[in-house]
């Protein structure tokens, strides 16, 4: 059995949703990389009894390691260290060297705020220098130190701000206490397959078949997630079960080869960026408010291949900025394949690019018709050699959903067109 861990995220602001928890998922990924089995992530407010209840719950579950985040500040509601000390039956002691370190940090910070009573601030921060007896001190990244308390289970206490927690975890994980706690960990392999254009129900049917036909299927831990309109299949397994994973991958390829666009975890964004290497692209967007251009420019080095973009909601903007003929819009409507194709050609010419992609649609709410309901979106990819790929689809959801899914559809159409041009595959 692998080493097991639990995470306690503290903070009333997180519990009530005012702040979104980023630490739980980040720590979960780090534990996965280490081969540690994560049993639970719990969330509670800044109440002593609730924090202690989470610790006792995880201890009763038999975890080897508990990680807490939050509650290490100087104010009265920051009480995680005190509660952990009580849980571990350790006395809280003032560490003089740590107090001096915190005082030095606070003094430098307060230099920017003239008129602040530095003495009062030091008195408040003094509580951060109280640590459980026998604990390993993790030096502050901000003003709050963390601690590691060896035991059964071992407890790692980390600050709440991710910019402080993440580097401090790297220090904590190499301590003898944490290494001892996770000594029984199993080294797992993890592989990710991505598909587009396949409903979850179709994948579920395939996995049921694989369960019957793939030897060792029961030793594969498979997680599926619908993300940005794509299906993500993450499989975790021990090295000796690589053959079972190969069998699963063969079934997925056989049943869904057309929909599978990545078997190595690569995102479509990465694939498009690779296909654009040495080329340029321009965008023309109506219903997506520049989100596609933003997505294309998220990758490092994108300035080398993104030539420019136009966001044109009004018909006059489509005509003036992209050269779309007013008569074409009048004849077919702004949301139509002919207009999408004209927008793509206009962007191609305006920015003298090798590739252009256009999106025009009805994102809602309102504005839809019986023939073009909300969610109707037209896409067109134009290449400098005259090749084009145009599609219309109806996407579900609210305005945000339609916009986000539109950018995903656009990226996949772009990938298909570029692969056809670069590799000679047939456009479908």
Image (cartoon, rainbow, N blue to C red):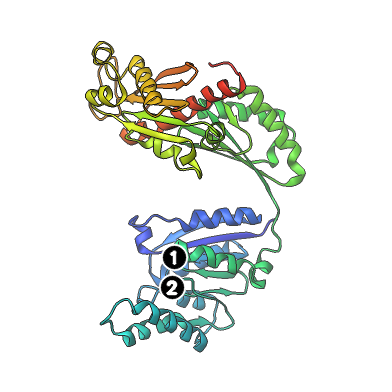
Kindly tell me whether residue 394 is visible in this rendering.
no
Looking at the rendered structure, the secondary structure element under dot 2 is loop
Q: Is 348 left, or right, of 192 in this rendering? A: left
Quick one: which residue is furthest to the front in this view? 352
Can you give x and y, in whole percent of width and height, for residue 35 in the image? 66, 54
* Disc 1: which residue: 160
Q: CA distance from mark 2 to mark 1?
A: 8 Å
Which residue occupies 26% across, 10% down? Answer: 331
Picture coordinates of residue 319, whole percent (x, y): 26, 22
Are circles 2 and 1 on residues that touch, CB within 8 Å? yes
| Residue at the spot 46% in from the left edge and 18% down from the top edge | 389
Q: Name which residue lies at 45% across and 30% down.
A: 281
Q: Locate the N terminus by quadrant.
A: bottom right
Q: Nearer the viewer, residue 376 or 38?
A: 376
User: Percent from the top left, x then y, of residue 245?
Assistant: 70, 37
Relative side of 179 to 21, left or right: right
Residue to which mark 2 is pinned: 72
| Rendered image quadrant of residue 260 | top right
First-in-chain label (2 vs 1):
2
Where residue 13 sits: x, y (%)?
A: 35, 61
**Does 216 sit left or right of 396 as displayed?**
right
The answer to whether one can see residue 289 in this image is: yes
Q: Secondary structure at mark 1?
A: loop
- Residue 123 vs 73, above or below: the answer is below
- Tell me which corner region of the image, top left, top right, bottom left or bottom right, holds residue 61: bottom right
* Of 186 and 428, the residue lying toward us: 428
């Amino acid at each position: 059995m692998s080493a097991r861990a639990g995470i306690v995220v503290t903070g009333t602001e997180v519990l009530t949703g005012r702040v979104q928890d980023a630490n739980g998922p980040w720590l979960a990924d780090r534990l996965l990389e280490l081969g540690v089995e994560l049993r639970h992530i719990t969330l509670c407010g800044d109440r002593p009894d609730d924090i202690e209840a989470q610790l006792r719950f995880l201890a009763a579950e038999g975890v080897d390691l508990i990680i807490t985040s939050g509650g290490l500040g100087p104010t009265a509601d920051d009480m995680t260290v005190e509660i952990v000390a009580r849980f571990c039956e350790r006395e809280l002691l003032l560490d003089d060297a740590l107090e001096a370190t915190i005082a030095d940090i606070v003094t430098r910070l307060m230099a920017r705020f003239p008129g602040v009573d530095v003495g009062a601030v030091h008195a408040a921060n003094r509580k951060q220098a109280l640590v459980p007896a026998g604990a390993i001190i993790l030096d502050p990244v901000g003003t709050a130190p963390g601690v590691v308390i060896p035991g059964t289970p071992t407890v790692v206490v980390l600050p709440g701000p991710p910019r402080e927690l993440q580097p401090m975890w790297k220090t904590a994980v190499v301590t003898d206490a944490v290494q001892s706690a996770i000594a029984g960990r199993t080294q797992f392999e993890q592989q990710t397959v991505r598909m587009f254009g396949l409903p979850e129900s179709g994948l579920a049917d395939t996995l049921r078949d694989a369960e019957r036909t793939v030897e060792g299927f029961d030793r594969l831990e498979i997680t599926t997630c619908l993300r940005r309109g794509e299906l993500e299949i993450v499989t975790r397994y021990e090295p000796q079960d690589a053959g079972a994973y190969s069998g699963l991958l063969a079934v997925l390829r056989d049943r869904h080869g057309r929909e599978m666009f990545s078997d190595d975890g690569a995102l479509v964004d990465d694939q498009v960026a690779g296909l654009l290497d040495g080329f340029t692209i321009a965008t023309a967007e109506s219903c997506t408010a520049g989100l596609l251009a933003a997505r294309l420019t998220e990758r490092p080095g994108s300035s080398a291949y993104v030539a420019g973009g136009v966001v044109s909601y009004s018909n006059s903007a489509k005509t003036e900025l992209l050269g779309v003929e007013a008569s074409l819009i009048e004849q077919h409507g702004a949301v139509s394949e002919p207009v999408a194709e004209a927008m793509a050609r206009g962007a191609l010419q305006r920015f003298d690019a090798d590739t252009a992609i256009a999106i025009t649609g009805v994102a809602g709410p309102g504005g839809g018709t019986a023939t073009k309901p909300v969610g109707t979106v037209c896409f067109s990819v134009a290449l400098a050699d005259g090749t084009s790929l145009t599609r219309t689809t109806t996407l579900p959801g609210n305005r945000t959903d339609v916009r986000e899914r539109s950018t995903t559809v656009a990226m996949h159409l772009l990938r298909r067109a570029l692969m056809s041009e670069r590799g000679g595959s047939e456009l479908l």
